[in-house]
Image: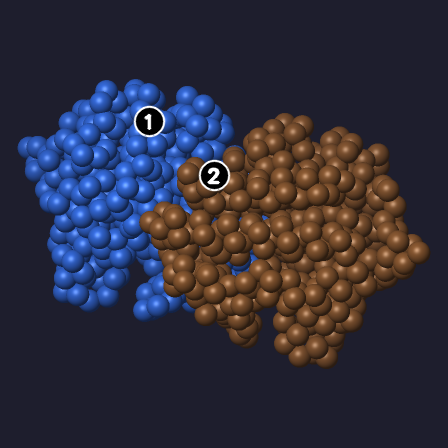
Chain colours: A blue, B brown
């Protein structure tokens, strides 16, 4: 019996149970970007690793940083430490992270640039990521879920076409609306890449998956249907055919009123909700259809104190009766005091 | 009889009629930032004026740029050429626009800084703005509405506290959540300033008002209720008591599912909808309650062609049966070809 088998998750972790029925008592909790710069031990490991990407591709250190928050806080899941842009990096569009700028890529200009990308190259290039998942699963207690993740095609494509983070997405929208045939070539490749990447994570021991569509909130109806919903729906269908037991959470940030009916349209088991989703509306409209995950404002976690306690209590009161995973509405901010996270977890657990 | 009286708007302009009942035929149309950098004649006048603020405070030239789009396009309204940040500038928090950065203000640190601001100073400082409104009304045909506007307190406060545009709004959210008593002092001042500013515009000849809450989409429930809805509700109530005949449109960008019931909660006559609002949902949920205004993606206007035609037709088909003003979902982008705007207006008019 391999280490992985010994340590494979219990048939029911607290997290996986939340996809089937409302949780008795406090909801399961994990936090987006729970491993990260707000932790001094993360900053130490990051310094040891070299660059951010070096850390992502170093299984020993990536496992270490993924475990760090679980040593401090009573969380129900670890999440793979990686980045949504390892997909373009693996496909052959080299990536670097510049201080004060963020990710920088040589942007794709046309379908000839897309044709030079390679799924085979990606699978080989991302072996260290899958090794990280496998080592992490071996280290984790059986009751703790291991979340694998990937960026969704639209969000990943924005970086590939803009060459960096964007506010307006002019180039990506130009492909989406003015060159839809070309854009489809790229998105189809990203659907394949995402299925491959997530499948490899499940094979290595991930028992829950999350798709991040961080920039989903920039589209009109047609754009959202074509470039957010359709690729995700195809990815989820492919994953479900292979791994029917693995829940898939979709975090389509900024989806707003489009969250109604979205889980069904995508075939997803849960939806991540950002802080702008009204709690009562989500309870009445979204939660009857799926597991809701969210939605504390990371800025309020950073502030802490009474404002945070009130915001936590609002979320618990609104969603406790249904399928529910406590989380933030976006990732932890780098200058968040770790003691605020401790206070948050205690309050969600009913201990403070 | 004064020039203003001669040229006061007809009891019913096409725009004002859209607040009472569905428009027979094509909806009225105006476009956010219809006077602006995308027009070569705007760039020429702007160069003559000196700085952007010089242009805002020069009635002759501000009238000229407000009229420029009406000479090119068959629009149903002119909008005052000004900026939402003339309020802090008028109150005594000096403002400048830096190339490539945008607005820069010496940021407020505490309530002592707020106490140094002066409503009286603002009223005097903004006289050129009211003269612009009055001259503009005199120049406009009676059938064309003149829209006055102001930034809403939350959005204006973000610039006053951050000192410039922001993505995360850390400082403004810190005031909102951790120093709510201090923040209320500022917001109360901005409510007074906004009522004063909009009242003076109506007195000078504006016949429709719009409040821009560009950054409304960053809040959880409590933040939205306290800092978006409550100040706007108070402003609208004060305006309605004085000018019951003047319609007020609220553009709370990013309000998402919070748009349901919002017009009633605010007492507004219309809601501006950004491109992320689903058309069918808005028809079923928002339009029965109020006039909807929007929501073509400015990025699609910039792209033009078939993608634009399809998007226009989608909006017309969805909303034509109810109270409806055609507009963009945000302002015209600076590099938009003017001929795309011409094609848009013709298509909405049913002429192309």
A281 sits to left or right of B50: left
Q: Which quadrant holds residue A335?
A: bottom left
Q: Is residue A294 visible?
A: yes
Label 2, label 1: how far apart the Cα atoms are: 18 Å
Residue nearer the viewer, B120 or A241: B120
From what the image shows, is residue B329 above or below residue B129? Answer: above
Same chain, labels 2 and 1: no
Q: Quadrant where the N terminus of chain A lies?
A: top left
Which dot marks residue A317?
A: 1
Q: Nearer the viewer, mark 2 or mark 1?
A: 2
Identify the residue shown where x is 30% and y is 32%: A313
Picture coordinates of residue B341, whole percent (x, y): 75, 57
Q: Quadrant where the C terminus of chain A lies?
A: top left
Q: Is residue A133 visible?
A: no
A322 sits to left or right of B45: left
Parent chain of label 2: B
């Amino acid at each position: 019996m391999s280490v992985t088998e010994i340590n494979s998750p219990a048939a029911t972790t607290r997290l996986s149970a939340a996809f089937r029925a409302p949780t008795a008592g406090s909801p399961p909790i994990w936090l987006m970007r729970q491993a990260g710069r707000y932790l001094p031990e993360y900053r130490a490991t990051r310094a040891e690793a070299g660059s951010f990407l070096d850390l992502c591709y170093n299984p020993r250190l990536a496992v270490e940083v993924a475990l760090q928050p679980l040593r401090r806080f009573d969380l129900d899941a670890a999440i793979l430490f990686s980045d949504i842009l390892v997909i373009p990096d693996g496909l052959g569009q080299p990536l670097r992270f510049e201080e004060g700028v963020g990710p920088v890529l040589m942007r794709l200009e046309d379908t000839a640039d897309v044709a030079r990308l390679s799924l085979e190259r990606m699978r080989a290039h991302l072996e260290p990521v899958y090794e990280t998942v496998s080592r992490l699963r071996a280290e984790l207690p059986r009751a703790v879920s291991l979340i694998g993740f990937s960026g969704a095609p639209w969000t990943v494509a924005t970086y590939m076409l803009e060459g960096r983070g964007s506010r307006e997405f002019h180039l990506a929208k130009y492909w989406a609306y003015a060159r839809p045939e070309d854009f489809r070539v790229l998105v189809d490749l990203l659907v394949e890449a995402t299925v491959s990447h997530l499948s490899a994570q499940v094979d290595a021991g991930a028992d829950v998956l999350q798709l991040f569509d961080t920039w989903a909130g920039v589209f009109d109806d047609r754009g959202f249907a074509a470039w957010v919903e359709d690729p995700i729906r195809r990815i989820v269908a492919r994953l479900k055919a292979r791994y029917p037991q693995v829940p898939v959470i979709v975090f389509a940030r900024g989806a707003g009123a489009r969250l109604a009916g979205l889980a069904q349209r995508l075939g997803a088991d849960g939806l991540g909700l950002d802080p702008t989703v009204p709690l009562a509306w989500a309870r009445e409209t979204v939660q009857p259809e799926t597991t809701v995950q969210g939605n504390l404002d990371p800025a309020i976690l950073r502030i802490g104190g009474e404002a945070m306690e009130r915001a936590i209590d609002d979320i618990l009161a609104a969603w406790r009766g249904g399928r529910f995973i406590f989380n933030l509405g976006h990732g932890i901010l780098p200058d968040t005091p770790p003691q605020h996270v401790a206070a948050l977890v205690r309050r969600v657990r009913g201990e403070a």
